[in-house]
Amino acid sequence: MDFAGKTVWIIGASDGIGAALARALAQEGARLILSARNQAALEALAASCGDARVLPLDLADTGSLDAAVASIAPGTLDAVICTAALYNPGRVQDMSREATAKLVAVNLLGSFEVARLTPPLLRDGGQLVLFGSVAGYFGLPGGQPYSATKAAVNNLAETLRAELSPRVDVRLVCPGFVSTRLTDKNDFSMPALITPDQAAAAVVKGLKGSSFELHFPKRFTCAVKLLRALPYALSLRLTARLSVKPADR
Ligand SMILES: NC(=O)c1ccc[n+]([C@@H]2O[C@H](COP(=O)([O-])OP(=O)(O)OC[C@H]3O[C@@H](n4cnc5c(N)ncnc54)[C@H](OP(=O)(O)O)[C@@H]3O)[C@@H](O)[C@H]2O)c1
């Protein structure tokens, strides 16, 4: 899609990849609707993105997305891009039910609600873009519950592609490591780390093309795809070596 003059709603625009994407799409001449919880951050971003509209919402609050959707006329958007997610990774045995429920509510239920409510807002052929992750390709130690929600989003996007095509052009974005406040929580050295601007450039390029899945940087994402393709007898032996034991932390 050529984004000049197109209307794009970014949910998760206040920070990280979503904010970089907003700046990149504004450069391309898109008109933007910017959503997330932090209204002040959205307004500051909007000021540098032409005539962007700020539409705050909280994906964890069931009525919040409904109200935002009701404020947009059906058939008027060219793309909806949902980057919103929480990240609080750890070992399954250390997790609290409350923290897990909140993360699932935003990352998984939020994606389902975006998928359920936003297609009527799109023009014919408009794009619905969900952010999964390479973390969803294979269950690595220390990455739950985030990676399970991202595996589910990857799977949801596959289903949507079959159910909504050709009226809606469903795309799945699976980044490797991108340097944002999200990955600032990682206490290990991240291979093939890229900047949010590099990630945004890869997404814009991918959305102009026709591939269903946009994954980058390929030197990292292809290695994890290879891990997924191995028999469990081999792949699980490899991931067990990465395992973080409580005593190591
Ligand atoms: N960074 C990486 O290495 C990486 C790798 C693979 C996949 N991803 C995926 O890429 C996407 C963007 O990640 P990022 O690194 O840019 O994260 P980020 O910097 O933490 O940004 C996340 C965005 O989501 C919004 N958000 C969080 N909770 C929300 C809620 N309840 N309702 C509405 N908006 C909410 C945040 O804004 P507010 O706090 O203002 O609400 C923020 O704008 C995520 O889906 C992530 O899973 C990231």
Image (spheres, rainbow, N blue to C red):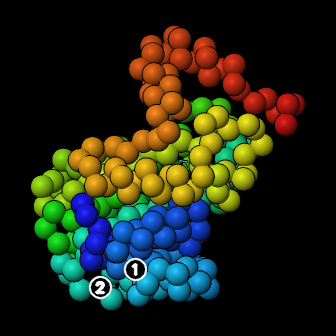
Give me the C-alpha separation between circle 2 and circle 1: 10 Å
Quarter of the image where one finds residue 231 = top left
The residue depicted at 52 percent of the width and 81 percent of the height is 48
Quarter of the image where one finds residue 124 = bottom left
Lower position in the chain sequence, tag 2 or tag 1: 1
Residue 168, given in percent of the width and then of the height, sits at: 19, 60
Quarter of the image where one finds residue 236 = top right
Circles 2 and 1, Cβ within 8 Å, touching? The answer is: yes
Q: Can residue 135 be spotted in the picture?
A: yes
The residue depicted at 45 percent of the width and 66 percent of the height is 24
Q: Which residue is mark 1?
A: 33
Q: Quadrant of the N terminus?
A: bottom left
Q: Is mark 1 within 8 Å of ligand 1?
A: no
Q: Is residue 60 left or right of residue 112?
A: right
Q: Which residue is mark 2?
A: 72
The residue depicted at 69 percent of the width and 19 percent of the height is 241
Q: Quadrant of the C terminus?
A: top right
Give 41 or 11, whichever is nearer the viewer: 41
Task: Count the numbered circles shown.
Answer: 2
Give the secondary structure at mark 1. Answer: strand
Residue 51, given in percent of the width and then of the height, sits at: 41, 87
Residue 61, given in percent of the width and then of the height, sits at: 50, 76
The residue depicted at 64 percent of the width and 52 percent of the height is 179
